[in-house]
Image (spheres, coloured by chain):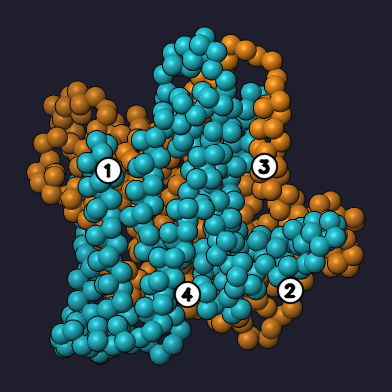
Chain colours: A orange, B cyan
């Protein structure tokens, strides 16, 4: 992010703070608070008793910290089921994503690859035209993957956009490296794993991060393909907790001994669901930002 | 080398595309996608007779054209403001805060919104402090669409802003220096140098947004809507979801709708791509 700020510094010849600066600062502060306060609110409610919450008007700091909500929500069990399912998505899904993406990106980045142009169009076409959810659902049904984690993991096996970003990066690498390795008798898989991947760590890190966030946030495929309470994904577990009373028709948990969740429990569940992303984001922000910039160069 | 990837594409992308032929078949569960009998255009006769289908199309167009008007400019304004902010320490912190919500799923964001906009929520507390009446934000059919624009920008406005900030950082600094020597005010500089400097980026993102007009917003609408707003929330993708997975499923009928959606979307994206190329940009794909 540094480069974005350098220009700002260099070109400011006049450096005193004007009225305009104050106005801009106030507007931006308001927008920033509009994002921060809801999170603080969620945090405060999750640590408060239902009575304290109902009595307060503007809950940003809990009156008295209680862990009862977390205890209750973790006892309910469905968050654990959600964690388990989502961790499986991550642990099997992301390596599969990376394997498919790097191998295909590497192949298509090599100038001599047969039918290279055809395969690029083969990929791009699926970005512009797809079958939608119904044929995919029927396919999953026909190959007996419905109600297994494989329907979600395989269905989201590859992201064309990330694939193209990766391929563009590989194409920018000096070709002499690959050529000399070939002369030494290395086969293509050895070249990919021993040479290309080690020198492409920045892009691999970024793409890994994106795939991980995608798998963590997985809910749509999981909702369509898995209708089994023992395999509910984390996002859907949260959905069933928060929206239970609100919109009951979407979810299969609903009428199973309808537990009334307090606001504190609901917000505790929200926090449990976003905690990992919240923890890694500030440290890995530059990788996230790089991802969009790589994509934007294309656009 | 590319075999695993190609196999994946064939099975999970091209077979479903072939599966769209179901639009011209009568689906029988025991015969599957491949062997169900052909029926020609029969499904479409029913599709175009369904008023809910036609309504959902108009609703999709209405909501998503509104996005171009009310949602699209926000990240540009945000980038211009943040670029003008001179206090670097705040700049960085604000950037972090603004980009973060994009990485949460709509399930999480909707959960937060249900809390913040609820009767006991922050927004209604504020309204009450200023002596107003509590508003039922999430149950109101009138407020639903504006709420879509606001929550989308709450979640992803900051993220899109990054693209514009990058474009701004690519503007030649000499232009700024000479403008300052000429005594231009900061607003003039913003208007005559920064904004023209990111014009290309704006155009490309705008065209891309137009290209996505038929398919945008399912995750958001699905999670923010509830029985009270179901009527105004049924965009095309919601309609497809409802007729496929919630009522007695007629997969041929749903596929017919789905194919219609894919074709329109394809035409829109292709035109978007051609237009960006025609404008001298690199194009959206390849």
Residue that numbered label 2 is attached to: A261
Q: Chain of mark 1?
A: B
Neighbour tally class for label 1: few under 14, some 14-19, many 20 plus, Cα within 10 Å: many
Q: Earlier in the sequence, mark 2 or mark 3?
A: 3
**Depth check: A275 or A246 in front?**
A246
Neighbour tally class for label 2: few under 14, some 14-19, many 20 plus, Cα within 10 Å: some
Q: Chain of mark 3?
A: A
Q: Are the residues at dot 1 and dot 2 in contact (C-beta closer than 8 Å)? A: no
Secondary structure at badge 3 equals helix
Q: Chain of mark 4?
A: B
Q: Are the residues at dot 1 and dot 3 in contact (C-beta closer than 8 Å)? A: no
Q: Is residue A183 left or right of residue A156?
A: left
Residue that numbered label 3 is attached to: A32
Name the disc covering residue B234, or none.
Answer: 4
Tell me the residue at 71%/36% (across/down).
A26
Q: Reply above or below: A59 against A169.
A: below
**Depth check: A211 or A10 in front?**
A10
């Amino acid at each position: 992010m540094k480069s974005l700020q350098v220009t700002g510094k260099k070109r400011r010849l006049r450096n005193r703070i004007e009225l305009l600066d104050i106005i801009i600062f106030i507007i931006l502060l308001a927008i920033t608070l509009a994002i921060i306060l809801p999170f603080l609110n969620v945090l405060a409610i999750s640590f408060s008793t239902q009575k304290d919450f109902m009595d307060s008007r503007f809950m940003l700091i809990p009156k008295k910290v209680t862990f009862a909500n977390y205890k209750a929500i973790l006892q309910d069990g469905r968050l654990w089921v959600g964690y388990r399912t989502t961790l499986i998505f991550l642990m099997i899904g992301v390596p599969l994503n990376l394997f498919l993406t790097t191998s295909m990106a590497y192949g298509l980045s090599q100038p001599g690859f047969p039918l290279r142009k055809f395969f690029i169009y083969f990929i791009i076409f699926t970005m512009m035209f797809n079958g939608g959810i119904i044929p995919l659902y029927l396919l999953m049904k026909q190959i007996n993957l419905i109600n297994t984690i494989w329907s979600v993991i395989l269905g989201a096996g590859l992201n064309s956009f990330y694939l193209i970003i990766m391929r563009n990066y590989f194409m920018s690498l000096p070709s002499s490296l690959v050529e000399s390795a070939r002369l030494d008798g290395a086969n293509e898989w050895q070249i990919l794993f021993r040479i290309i991947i080690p020198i492409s760590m920045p892009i691999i890190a970024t793409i890994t991060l994106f795939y991980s966030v995608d798998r963590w946030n997985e809910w749509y495929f999981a909702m369509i393909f898995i209708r089994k309470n023992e395999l509910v994904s984390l996002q859907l577990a949260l959905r069933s907790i928060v929206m239970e009373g609100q919109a009951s028709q979407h979810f299969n948990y609903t009428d199973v001994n309808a537990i009334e969740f307090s606001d504190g429990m609901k917000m505790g569940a929200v926090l449990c669901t976003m905690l990992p992303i919240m923890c890694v984001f500030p440290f890995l922000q530059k990788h996230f930002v790089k991802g969009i910039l790589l994509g934007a160069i294309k656009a | 080398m590319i075999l695993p990837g190609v196999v994946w594409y064939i099975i999970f992308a091209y077979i479903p595309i072939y599966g769209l032929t179901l639009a011209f078949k009568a689906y029988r569960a025991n015969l599957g996608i491949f062997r169900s009998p052909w029926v020609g255009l029969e499904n479409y006769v029913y599709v175009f007779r369904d008023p809910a289908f036609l309504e959902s199309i108009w609703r999709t167009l209405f909501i998503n054209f509104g996005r171009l008007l009310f949602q699209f400019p926000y990240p540009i304004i945000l980038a211009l403001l943040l670029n003008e902010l001179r206090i670097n320490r705040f700049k960085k912190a604000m950037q972090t805060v603004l980009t973060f919500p994009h990485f949460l799923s709509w399930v999480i964001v909707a959960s937060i919104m249900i809390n913040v906009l609820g009767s006991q929520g922050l927004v209604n507390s504020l309204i009450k402090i200023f002596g107003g009446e509590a508003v039922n934000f999430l149950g109101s059919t009138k407020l639903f669409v504006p709420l879509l624009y606001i929550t989308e920008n709450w979640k992803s406005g900051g993220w899109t802003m990054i693209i514009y900030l990058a474009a701004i950082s690519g503007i030649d600094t000499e232009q700024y220096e000479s403008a300052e020597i000429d005594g231009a005010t900061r607003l003039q500089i913003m208007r005559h140098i920064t904004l023209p400097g990111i014009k290309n980026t704006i155009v490309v993102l705008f065209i891309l947004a137009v290209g996505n007009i038929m398919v945008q917003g399912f995750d958001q609408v699905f999670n923010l809507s509830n029985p009270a707003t179901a009527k105004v929330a049924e965009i095309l993708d919601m309609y497809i979801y409802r007729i496929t997975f919630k009522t007695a499923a007629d997969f041929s009928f749903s596929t017919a709708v789905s194919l219609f959606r894919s074709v329109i979307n394809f035409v829109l994206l292709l035109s978007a791509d051609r237009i960006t190329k025609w404008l001298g940009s690199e194009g959206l794909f390849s």
